[in-house]
Image (spheres, coloured by chain):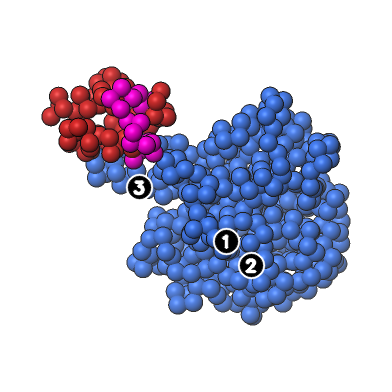
């Protein structure tokens, strides 16, 4: 797993209080990891903070899964 | 009008998390005051308060993990957390867990707070200043809003009846219980979860109440003796925190399901001073009218009221209330016991009225008035028994709880044995 993926996973585990095993590439924050809409907003803010990037609202809406987040951040970097 | 009784009690207080733990410590005359531990308060005019004892949940300590997952704790201000905990205790105590539509739709929630999520507002304002608007938490607003105690409780239990809240400063808890009782009387609900929650012991809260000269400042070396209602050496209130929640229920509804009935809410009176933003009317006009309205509603006479839990904050206003009570009780003032439990737990602001109503209910149950501790040298002579320093065992059939708030808002509740 890439460094970005490790760091994203750590944030997801912390914010959503889920087991690390459940944070798979296709895991949806809302459908699989118990997040609600406000949790996803907070997650995106945590990604921005961790990686020093800005994720515009329309882009944030496309980040539905753990894999989406890792891909977006790797591209942004 | 339908009768309303109390069938469940819940409390997080500076003495303990839990009704019975708090009550036994209160009767023992213990003070919950100490140097503030939640943050460094040395630079403030007041560095002491009555904080809820945090811990692992044993020996009366409050362990947030016992009441809410760590994930969800981050999404609520502590006042909401205290409210959720006290509500859980009250609902468990009442044994009320309706699974059907009718039961859920006929159960409402009315919990207030004087200030709400002040600490959360403060933290997010700092974030806004330091990091900009994009770093303000999406949970900021729902974590801080006063009516979100009611919202969270309704979501947790599926209570889909009236969902309401009260904000009347230090009269909040009393107004919440009184208004919720009326919703049941008027048939808007059969059961109401009602009370108040507060957590304003933070830098901004202490600085703010210091600025309006409301807090005791003179006992940095001896905080346990700082809250001293009616005493000559009182110099302001000591801030407390916590929550008090009761389950109110229509009498026949409670009887039909065999619920334990603690007391009946028989009287409720409200008034406004129209006088000053922080000071009560000097002649006690609003206080007297609130008490008389509650007594008229309960159809009781001065001699019928055996115990008054005073607002008694340990400020200059104490003697105004004492004079008002003395006048209202007339020739029977000498038969009355009136105490201020704020001497032990400090002033819980929006939670005070609810916590103190619960103390009245326990006084009815156990036939004992909790003491006014630290009352060494009364500022005024009185025929009223203020039960200084020791609990007073006596006949208590009817109790009254007074609560007065900034803005000149007054509420009196009357609770009776059933």
Magenta-tinted stretch: A14-30
Precedes in sequence: disc 2 or disc 3 = 2
Q: Which mark is residue B123?
A: 3
Between tags 1 and 2, which lies in front? 1
Disc 3 chain ID: B
Answer few, some or many: residues within 10 Å of disc 3's Cα (few below 14, many 20 plus, some between 14 and 19). few
Q: Colour of chain A?
A: red
Mark 1–mark 3 distance (CA, rounded to whole Å) = 29 Å
- B345 or B12, which is in the foreground? B12
- Disc 2 crowd rating (10 Å Cα; few below 14, some 14-19, many 20+) is some
Residue B26, how many percent across, how many down?
A: 65, 66
Instruction: Tell me which chain appears blue.
Output: B
Magenta-drawn stretch contains A34 = no
Are discs 2 and 3 both within one chain? Answer: yes
- State the image coordinates of residue B64 (x, y, percent, origin top left): 49, 50
The residue to which callout 2 is attached is B25
Q: Are marks 1 and 2 on the same chain?
A: yes
Q: Which mark is residue B290?
A: none
Q: Quadrant of residue B131?
A: top left
């Amino acid at each position: 797993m890439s460094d970005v993926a490790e760091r994203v996973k750590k944030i997801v585990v912390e914010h959503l209080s889920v087991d690390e095993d459940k944070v798979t590439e296709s895991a949806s924050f809302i459908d699989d990891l118990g997040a609600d809409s406000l949790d996803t907003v907070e997650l995106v803010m945590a990604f921005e903070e961790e990686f020093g990037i800005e994720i515009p609202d329309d882009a944030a809406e496309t980040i539905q899964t753990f894999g989406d987040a890792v891909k977006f951040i790797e591209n942004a970097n | 009008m339908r009768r309303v009784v109390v069938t469940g009690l819940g409390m997080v207080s500076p003495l303990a998390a839990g009704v019975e733990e708090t009550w036994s410590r209160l009767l023992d005359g213990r003070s919950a005051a100490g140097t503030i531990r939640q943050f460094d308060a040395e630079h403030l005019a007041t560095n002491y308060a009555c904080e809820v004892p945090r811990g692992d949940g044993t020996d009366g300590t409050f362990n947030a993990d016992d009441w809410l997952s760590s994930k969800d704790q981050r999404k609520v201000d502590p006042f909401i957390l205290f409210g959720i905990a006290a509500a859980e205790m009250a609902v468990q105590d009442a044994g009320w867990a309706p699974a059907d539509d009718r039961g859920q739709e006929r159960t409402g929630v009315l919990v207030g707070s004087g200030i709400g999520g002040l600490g959360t507002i403060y933290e997010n304002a700092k974030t806004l200043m330091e990091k900009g608007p994009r770093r303000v938490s999406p949970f900021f607003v729902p974590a801080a809003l006063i009516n979100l105690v009611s919202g969270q409780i309704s979501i947790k239990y599926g209570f889909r009846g009236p969902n309401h809240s009260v904000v009347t400063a230090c009269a909040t808890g009393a107004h919440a219980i009184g208004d919720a009782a009326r919703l049941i009387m008027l048939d808007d609900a059969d059961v109401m979860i009602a009370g108040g929650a507060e957590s304003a012991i933070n830098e901004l809260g202490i600085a703010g109440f210091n600025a309006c000269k409301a807090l005791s400042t003179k006992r940095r070396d001896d905080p346990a003796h700082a809250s001293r209602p009616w005493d000559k050496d009182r110099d302001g209130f000591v801030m407390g925190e916590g929550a008090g929640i009761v389950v109110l229920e229509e009498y026949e509804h409670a009887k039909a399901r065999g619920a334990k009935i603690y007391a009946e809410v028989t009287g409720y009176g409200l008034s406004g001073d129209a006088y000053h933003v922080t000071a009560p009317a000097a002649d006690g006009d609003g206080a007297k009218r609130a008490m008389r309205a509650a007594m008229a509603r309960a159809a009781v006479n001065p001699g019928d009221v055996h115990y008054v839990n005073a607002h008694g904050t340990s400020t200059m206003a104490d003697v105004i209330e004492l004079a008002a009570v003395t006048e209202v009780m007339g020739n029977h003032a000498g038969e009355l016991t009136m105490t201020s439990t704020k001497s032990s737990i400090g002033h819980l602001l929006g939670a005070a009225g609810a916590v103190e109503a619960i103390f009245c209910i326990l006084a009815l149950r156990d036939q004992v008035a909790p003491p006014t501790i630290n009352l060494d040298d009364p500022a005024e002579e009185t025929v009223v028994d203020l039960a200084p320093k020791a609990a007073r065992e006596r006949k208590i059939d009817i109790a009254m709880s007074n609560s007065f708030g900034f803005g000149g808002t007054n509420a009196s509740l009357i609770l009776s044995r059933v």
